Amino acid sequence: MNGVDINSNLDSIKAKAEDIRNLLLTTSTGNWEDILGHFVVLSGEYGSLVREVNNIYDSVAVFPEQVTGDPNLIPNLLRTKLSPELETKNRDIINQYVSKNSTHYDPGNQEENIPPLKLHIKSFNDRIDKVDQEFENKIQQISKHKLTKPSASHDTAILKDILSITMLGSGIKINAQQQLAQQQQQQATINALQQQQRLLNAQQQQQQQQQPQALYKLPATNTANTSTNTPSSTIVINSPSPGGIHHNVPTPPTNLNAAGTRTSPPNVQQYVNSPPPQQQQQQQINTVIGTPNTIPTTPTATVSTAATYKPVASPQQQVTSKQVPIQSTNKPLPQQQPSIQIQPQQSIVQMVQNVLPNTTSPPVNNNNQSPINSGIGGGQFKPSAINIANANSGTSTIQQQIQLQQQQLQQQIQLQQQLAQQQQQNQQNQQNQQNQQNQQNQQIHQHIQHLTPQQQAQLQQQMLQQQQLQQQFQQQQLSQQLLQQQQLHQQQQPNQTIQNPFHNFQANNFRVQNPTNFNPPQNQ
Amino acid sequence: MFQQNKHHQQQQQQQQQQGVVQSGVASATVNNPSESIVAGNIYECSLHGILSTPSSTFIQRAKGMMRCEHPVSYKEMVFKSTVQSAGPSWAEGSILPSEIHVRYEKNTVYVRYVGVPQIKDNINAMIRNVVDIKSSETFFIYLENLGYVKDYEYFVDGYQYSTYNLSLFLVNHRRVLNDGTKGELLNKHSMVELQCLSGEEGFVAAAEYLNTYAEYLYPFVELIKFDHRLLTAENSNTPTTNVNVVGGYNR
């Protein structure tokens, strides 16, 4: 036992440890480097002690003695981590151990069996990835074709609609349809008549503004016109209502007997007070356009003549009730309808303007003569004449009323006739267009017949190409429509959750993460 | 000529006189029409659905499931009775049906009595008593003489897929214009109807059969048992529809 210095070393170590403890306890704000220096001294004394002890217990004890690096940087005994050399040595030993354990698959050939095992694991992972990919593709296809459960409420509502139609006939009842159609037709006719009346009314107001002093034209001025045998006779009457309107519509001739007295005048009072049901609609229109229906009747001396009127339905009333062109039974006129040439683009205002020149010099045939309708070329207004009995008096308000009513009725008749003519002309125009197309086709055929065979072949090729192009175009349109429908369908049902049958599948659960963790069952 | 269910003996006589329709569903189920008369009343069990998926895939599935396919195109006219009177003397106690369906298909008239749907909670199908009779054009005159008036009419176009005792219809309905021609579609969606005929005792089996097929068609179309009371309950609120006129659904 040569260790003479062991006790002294132990004492010095103990003293140094005391110093360090006092230092740490006394100095609250100690210097870290100073403290480390103390430790260095302590570790040096410890090292000398260990060297001495090592000589004694060399065969029984191992100390991490040989450390490299700067010992002053961190004292040996304060280390919590192994030195880098020890770490690398440790890693190598562990790897050797792991490699030894991983060769349980075939212990015989360690080095040769590891690559096939890794290949196997890799192929397994690849297969799982492929399965995952296939599932995703299938989910996308399902979402594309929308083979999902349709929303039950939406389909049930549609089904209810269809079955209510097929089982109950809701919405396609025949009676309801007919009623609807009749109502629509009535409304259409009423609207058309109202529009015509409005246009005419506006035109008349304009004319009244132009001629504000156009009052009742006395027959003295008209005798000159009758002497010139103008067949057309229009009447301007200042209506007794404040909103007076000029009625310049021709009236058909009334029936006259040989004595020139009226035999079938319109029963004005009956018409005004108790209109027949067919004329209620027209009366409503008259009220709309402001035509006076209630005309104040002033008792004048000519009442006696008015009293001779027989309450027989006048031809005007018959006409309005039937809404057909005028048919005079006693004296059939050669020209019943006013022949107004209406161009298709011609508006009603223009039609009225064609009529208007007659109103500037209204000739009234007041000589109790039957009207003479001489043929005047088309484009001119040729109405049938009206005969007014006792028009020379000029004070008979009842006659004015009669004229007024007659003119109103005939105005409506003329409007209907004009409408009918317009429809006929439209039909004629359509027929003309069709004829033109047929003629063009015939011309094309004739032209083809005159061509040479080569040119005909070229033409046929061109026709075929055009047909092909048209087919392609139609196919493109179809495909576009299909795409749009699909897009619409997807937009309409964006919130539908797709029932994924593989939603529980997660590839990472099956994938082998690390080959070293792959532990196949050992062969016992 | 048509009777209620309790008078089906007279009905059988009448059917023997006029013969039975060899068309549509009846042909799919019964090969010999005279056998069906002996069997008694025929009931039509049906499931309905709306095809909201593309029709091409549905048609492929239907072709794969069914035996034959042929187009269907007819005009269905429904006549309602204006008088509720007793029937002929040999059918004492019976009343005329409130409505008679007439299918006009390729100049052939099929008269069809469709009964009121029966409500059975344990059977998942709409059950209706049907009688199909082939007739001629003069039947319209006979209907008028009986006091029937055409109530409504519509066109049916589509396809019928049928197998041994099952028929699948994929049809669209069109409006009838005033001149009798085809108008626009009443609904842009196609209706799917799966039908199966049965006797009075075979409701349960027929409904099971229908539902088995409906399961195969499920992802394409959802076939349900439609409750007709939904129609009458809703339409009775609207004053425009006269529920009493229609098929006696309030009975």
Image (cartoon, coloured by chain):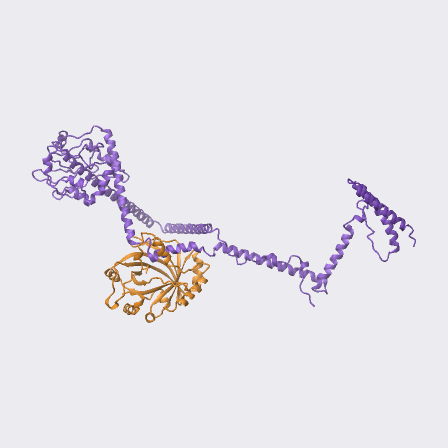
Chain colours: A purple, B orange
Report x, y in % for residue A17: 83, 46
**Which quadrant holds the C terminus of chain A?**
bottom right
Q: Quadrant of residue B55?
A: bottom left
The single residue placed furthest to the left in the displayed view is: A259
Q: Nearer the viewer, residue B219 or A111?
A: B219
**Which quadrant holds the N terminus of chain A?**
bottom right
**Side of B92 relative to A35 (left or right):** left
The single residue placed furthest to the top in the displayed view is: A213
* Whether residue B30 is situated above or below residue A255 in the rendered picture: below
Q: Nearer the viewer, residue A246 or A433?
A: A246
**Side of A342 relative to A312 (left or right):** right
Q: Quadrant of residue B53?
A: bottom left
Residue located at (24% from left, 32% from top): A205
Residue B214 visible somewhere in the drawing: yes
Report x, y in % for residue B200: 36, 68
How many numbered tags mark residues here?
Answer: 0
**Side of B117 relative to A69 (left or right):** left
Residue located at (56% from left, 58% from top): A504
Report x, y in % for residue A345: 28, 39
Report x, y in % for residue B137: 26, 62
Residue A335 visible somewhere in the drawing: no
Q: Nearer the viewer, residue B42 or B17?
A: B42
